[in-house]
Image: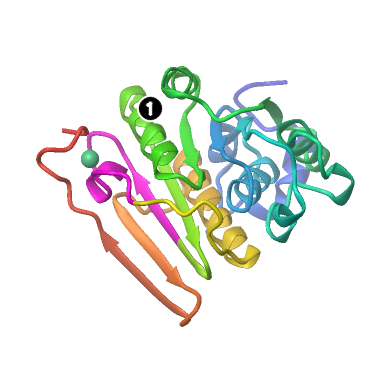
Amino acid sequence: MNDDRLSEEERIRYARQLGEGVLTEEGQVRLRRSTALVTRVGGMGGPAAMMLAMGGIGKLIIAHGGPLESPDLNRQVLGREEGLGQPRAGQFAETLRSVSRFVEVEALDDEPDDDQALELARRCDIIVSCPPTFEERLRLNRAALAASIPLIDAAQWGLTGTLFVARPGHTACLACAYPTAPPFEKLFPVVGAISAATGSLAALEAIKILSGTGTPMWGQMWVYDGFHGRTRQFEVARRKDCICR
Ligand SMILES: [Zn+2]
């Protein structure tokens, strides 16, 4: 395969997303040369990983511990009924490979600790952060800062989704928005439709950044309050005493 150009098969696969208002061929090649870390790959990270795989990213590293359980299947689109009780990461990786023969998927059976997050960030071009806990989200933020790569943070609660897009050295980081981890509710309510919408938009931002398409939402917090059907978007200010300074 010529590394600088798309193969004929790739040109056919991505025909609907190449051209004016979408990706250039050079952008599609840049996306193929890119690696994204997506963790976790449940309600938001699953659709994010799926859209990155189908969109033509070269390599995905996914991380998610534990077995697939029945309540996961209201939103974890990479799961299947027959996978209940089985570890998530391997079967989720198989689902991703089944939708694209062009993507390489590396699956980790656990959520990374501080050292692993940094090691993974150094092998990646972007982090798509979709864990439920602030502890993990702030850890991925620190890893993105240390490796100087963009971070897209996706979060959900009930019928609400939020997205934040950080560029180290240029915009606020996640810790500017959340200096300390707020209290965490383990089994918080969530409807799969908002998870998938938020995860898909996280993937869209990643595709834009990696391929050089459009205007990324750098430094912006996007909030969709699905309960009331309202959208808000605002710039997060950089804190002077933050770790990103
Ligand atoms: Zn910061």
Residue plotted at (51% across, 43% down): 131
Side of 33 relative to 212 (left or right): right
Does any atom of ligand 1 lie closer than 8 Å to the CB of label 1? Answer: no
Which is nearer the eye, 70 or 111?
Answer: 70
Q: Which residue is mark 1?
A: 143
Compared with 7, 71 (above or below) is below
Q: Residue furthest bottom?
A: 228
Check disc 1 and report its element: helix, strand or loop: helix
Residue plotted at (61% across, 28% down): 110
Compared with 129, 148 (above or below) is above
Side of 140 relative to 95 (left or right): left
Which is nearer the eye, 20 or 209?
Answer: 209
The location of residue 111, given as percent across then percent down, is 55, 30
Which is nearer the eye, 14 or 103?
Answer: 103
Q: Please say whether residue 241 is visible from this viewpoint.
A: yes
Q: Bounds of the magenta span? A: 162-182
